Amino acid sequence: QSVLTQPPSASGTPGQKVIISCSGSSSNIEPNPINWFQQVPGTAPKLLIYNINLRPSGVPDRFSGSKSGTSASLAISGLQSEDEGQYYCASWDDSLDAWVFGGGTKLTVL
Amino acid sequence: QVQLVESGGGVVQPGRSLRVSCAASGFTFNKYGMHWVRQAPGKGLEWVAFISNDGNNKYYGDSVEGRFTISRDNSKNTLYLQMNSLTTEDTAVYFCAKSSFMILVTHDAFDDWGHGTLVTVSS
């Protein structure tokens, strides 16, 4: 069981907006920044969002992040077929003294 | 561009040891901390360990503490993970990931990843 909780699946049609949630606690998401990673099956994870809502160069502005209290969200607007994959949230946990990840959300573009 | 290439994975019996490596290029290796993250088959990501840029500070996840040792050779631009007393629970793809910082910080970004090396623990 993962320390951060994500829905196992999400879906949308091309052009739609999808939001993926990540629920944590007062020892991880609330006091610390959060990162989001995208993983296409069989490939390495790729940093999508860091420090809650910052994008590395090359990541389209269709991807955005937010945080409120012990929860965070990743929003993907203008959904495209190449957005299919697994999405993971991650944060430092002050109680565990460790990085913790969500269980992942499988995004399907219908 | 940043390139991280893991190697050394394979099949190993329970209780035995294995060392995996990560060869780095495209950045100044001795200026950045490095992570190991693993992914069991069909499962999510699990943080394993972190080492500071100079190798002096090391941190481990609870499930590997006391059994795994992270190290680096800055003269060879290579990161290592020595895994001892392996169990079937350690079966996973092991990824190395570059930190955005020299030392462990709570706002790190894991900004580049290798493609991983598969370690299978089986009798």
Image: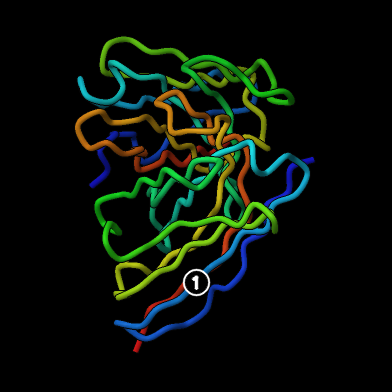
Q: Is residue A35 at all visible to an observer of this figure?
A: yes
**x and y percent of residue A99 in the render?**
36, 38
Quadrant holding the N terminus of chain B: top right
In the image, A28: left or right of A49?
left
Rendering coords of residue A6 (x, y %)? 33, 34
As helix, strand or loop, the secondary structure at mark 1 comes to strand
The picture quadrant where one finds residue A21 is top left
On the picture, is A78 further left or further right than B50? Answer: right
Q: Which residue is drawn at 40% across and 39% down?
A: A9
**Residue positioned 23% across, 47% down in the render:** A1
Residue linked to disc 1: B19
> B9 and A3: which one is in front?
B9
Chain under disc 1: B
Count the marks: how many? 1
Across and down, in percent, residue A91 comes to 37, 29
**Which residue is located at x 67 percent, y 30 percent?**
A80
Q: Can you say whether B27 is above or below B80 in the image?
A: above
Residue B44 shows in the view: no
Q: Residue at x 44, y 55 (%)?
A: B38
| Quadrant, the C terminus of chain B | bottom left
* Of B89 and B6, the residue lying toward us: B6
User: What residue type is disc 1 on?
Assistant: Arg
